[in-house]
Image (tube, rainbow, N blue to C red):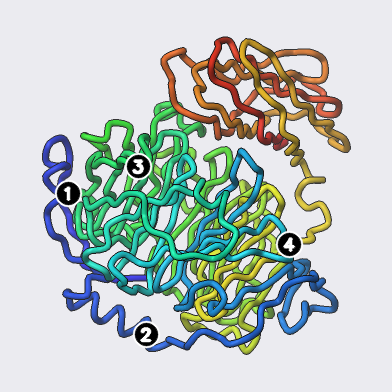
């Protein structure tokens, strides 16, 4: 959380580039009045890292509302590594990485004094591999990490000289004992930054809340991972706290295949088209009642709905938005959390994955919501894991962030005082039996070949209507690929025929298919044709959402 004075202005064309070097009021800038006050407020709840032995070797199931000493519901404890065992300091944000060459899974743990790298492939016996110290040995309560093309990008707030560290994650493959790492490259286009987001489809990092761009969006091209370059600014709505940027494939036909940023701007949801980095276009700026601090949010897979939290509204609510019209998004509903499991705890970060909303709610820990009926403004709690058992008070302690995107189904929680906690939801098939089907088996894509991956759908009683097809393909030149969905009756739906000139890596996208004439049950196939030589890859995973 941070507070700042909104700065209005126009940032297009050459002016956007000039603004990247224009100082701006920054709430976590240690030299600003607002920054000093925000740091004081945050530190007033500061507690030292908890001292306890690592919990490893055997999973601890959630039984009768407890997994060991942790309150829980439908979530088992796999392991816990205290901060003292992963580099010290206090915890904050984190992200994950899967090495597609080895299929090993890693969590990159943000801490006040650096970034810890933990191999979680064996989640009951995670391995700490080492630490990337904060730039110049500095320390900050706010650190953020994102991953693109096997590289980690690390920013920090309240450190005016930090910039962005670049670390080649493939170096972890040969690590056998914990070590202190050095960065592979350093980006100095900004000093401090509050958070980073990444668009893996386009190869851009978006730093927000920095000392540039009036605190707005500082765009960085990382398509050459070790040579990040300044791509421009979004600064006409002032300070941005967090954001998510995607290649849009939602219902608003005017912006399909445009790169769109959903910005959380302290008191509004602000949507910006950043397809042209030198001339970003603000599409809408929408407020809501009782706005105290618009913090963070996430889109559904079809880009139709969005969930958002307000960090300081004192009620833990989740705001539900219909963003089918990017020029006029609508706040359509509110989820009020279960008071018995949430209490007065503050909501912080949340992500949507495979039909669930995964939320980090400080002293209330991880909460998981079933989002099958989000289009009807309905969310239902289906599980939780509380890493701060003492209470659920409204203080800045406990779960800072969660990471639910690992193929193994492991969910990581980063606790400010607790360190890294790995858990496994045990949700009894909700929502997969309610219309979500997935195949995570790898299928190799070789030169000039056609391959398929199958999903058998059962138990569906209605025609699919609009069918969502989530595709995760790893490939070193996607311009080689033609991707289709084959229905059980043999009907072929073309999803993507990339132009040969598209040299980008990978396909991570959800497609929408009008399958209203199809019977839902049966064997559906994802077909991938590689029509050229030299570059290969694999179908990493894909899913169907009815």
Task: Determine whether label 1 and label 4 are within 8 Å by CB.
Answer: no
SS at circle 1: loop
Res. 455 image quadrant: top right
Viewer-nearest of labels 3 and 4? 3
Q: Residue at x 84, y 36 (%)?
A: 460
Quadrant containing the N terminus is bottom left
Indicate the secondary structure of the residue bearing disc 3: loop
Residue 447 percent across, percent down from the top left: 61, 14
Please give the residue where the numbered disc 2 appears in the rendered image: 43
Disc ID at residue 226: 3
Please give left or right for residue 191 compared with residue 274 in the image: left
Inter-mark Cα distance, 3 to 2? 35 Å
- In the rendered view, does 339 fall on the left or right side of 303? right
Q: Which residue is mark 4?
A: 424
Q: Earlier in the sequence, mark 2 or mark 4?
A: 2
Residue 292 visible, this orientation: no
Figure check: 392 above or below 347? below
Secondary structure found at label 2? helix
* Residue at which label 1 appears: 20
Q: Is residue 31 visible?
A: yes
306 relative to 534, above or below: below
Marks 3 and 4, the one that precedes in the sequence: 3
Of marks 2 and 1, which one's residue comes earlier in the chain? 1
Give the vertical position of 449 relative to 444 (above or below).
above
* Quadrant where the C terminus is found in the figure: top right
Cα separation between marks 1 and 3: 20 Å
Closer to the N terminus: mark 3 or mark 2? 2
């Amino acid at each position: 959380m941070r507070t700042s004075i909104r700065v209005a202005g126009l940032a297009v064309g050459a002016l956007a580039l000039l603004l990247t070097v224009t100082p701006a009021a920054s709430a976590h800038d240690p030299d600003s009045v607002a920054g000093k006050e925000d740091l004081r407020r945050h530190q007033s709840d500061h507690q030292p890292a908890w001292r306890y032995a690592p919990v490893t070797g055997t999973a601890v199931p959630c039984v009768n509302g407890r997994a060991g000493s942790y309150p829980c519901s439908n979530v088992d404890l796999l392991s816990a590594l205290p901060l003292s065992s992963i580099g010290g300091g206090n915890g904050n944000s984190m992200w994950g990485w899967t090495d597609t060459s080895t299929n090993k899974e890693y969590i990159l743990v943000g801490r006040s004094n650096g970034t810890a790298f933990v191999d979680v492939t064996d989640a009951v016996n995670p391995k700490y591999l080492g630490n990337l110290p904060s730039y110049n040995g500095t320390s900050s309560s706010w650190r953020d990490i994102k991953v693109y093309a096997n590289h980690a990008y690390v920013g920090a707030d309240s450190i005016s000289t930090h910039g962005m560290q670049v670390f080649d994650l493939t170096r972890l493959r040969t690590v056998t004992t914990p070590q202190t790492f050095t960065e592979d490259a350093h980006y100095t286009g900004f000093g401090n930054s509050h958070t980073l987001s990444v668009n893996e489809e386009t190869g851009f990092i978006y730093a927000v809340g920095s000392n540039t761009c009036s605190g707005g969006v500082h765009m960085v091209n990382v398509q050459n991972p070790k040579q990040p370059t300044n791509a421009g600014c979004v600064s006409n709505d002032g300070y941005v706290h967090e954001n998510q940027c995607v290649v849009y494939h939602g219902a608003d036909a005017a912006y399909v295949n445009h790169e769109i940023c959903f910005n959380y701007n302290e008191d509004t949801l602000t949507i910006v088209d950043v397809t042209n980095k030198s001339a970003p276009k603000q599409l809408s700026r929408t407020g809501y009642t009782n706005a105290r601090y618009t913090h963070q949010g996430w889109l559904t897979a079809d880009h139709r709905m969005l969930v958002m939290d307000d960090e300081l509204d004192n009620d833990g609510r989740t705001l539900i938005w219909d963003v089918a019209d990017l020029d006029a998004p609508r706040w359509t509903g509110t989820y009020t959390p279960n008071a018995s499991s949430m209490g007065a705890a503050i909501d912080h970060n949340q992500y949507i994955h495979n039909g669930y909303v995964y939320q980090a709610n400080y002293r209330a820990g991880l909460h998981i919501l079933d989002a099958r009926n989000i289009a009807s403004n309905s969310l239902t709690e289906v599980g939780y894991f509380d890493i701060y058992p003492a209470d659920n008070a409204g203080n800045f302690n406990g779960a800072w962030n969660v990471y639910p995107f690992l193929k193994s189904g492991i969910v990581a929680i980063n606790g400010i005082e607790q360190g890294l906690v790995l858990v496994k939801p045990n949700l009894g098939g909700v929502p997969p039996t309610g219309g979500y089907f997935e195949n995570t088996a790898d299928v190799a894509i070789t030169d000039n070949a056609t391959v398929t991956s199958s999903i058998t759908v059962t138990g569906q009683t209605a025609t699919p209507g609009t069918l969502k097809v989530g595709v995760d393909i790893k490939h070193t030149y996607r311009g080689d690929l033609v991707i289709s969905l084959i229905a059980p009756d043999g009907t072929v739906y073309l999803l993507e025929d990339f132009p040969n000139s598209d040299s980008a890596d990978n396909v991570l996208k959800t497609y929408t298919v009008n399958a209203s004439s199809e019977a839902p049950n049966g064997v559906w196939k994802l077909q991938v044709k590689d029509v050229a030589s030299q570059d290969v890859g694999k179908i990493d995973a894909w899913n169907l959402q009815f």
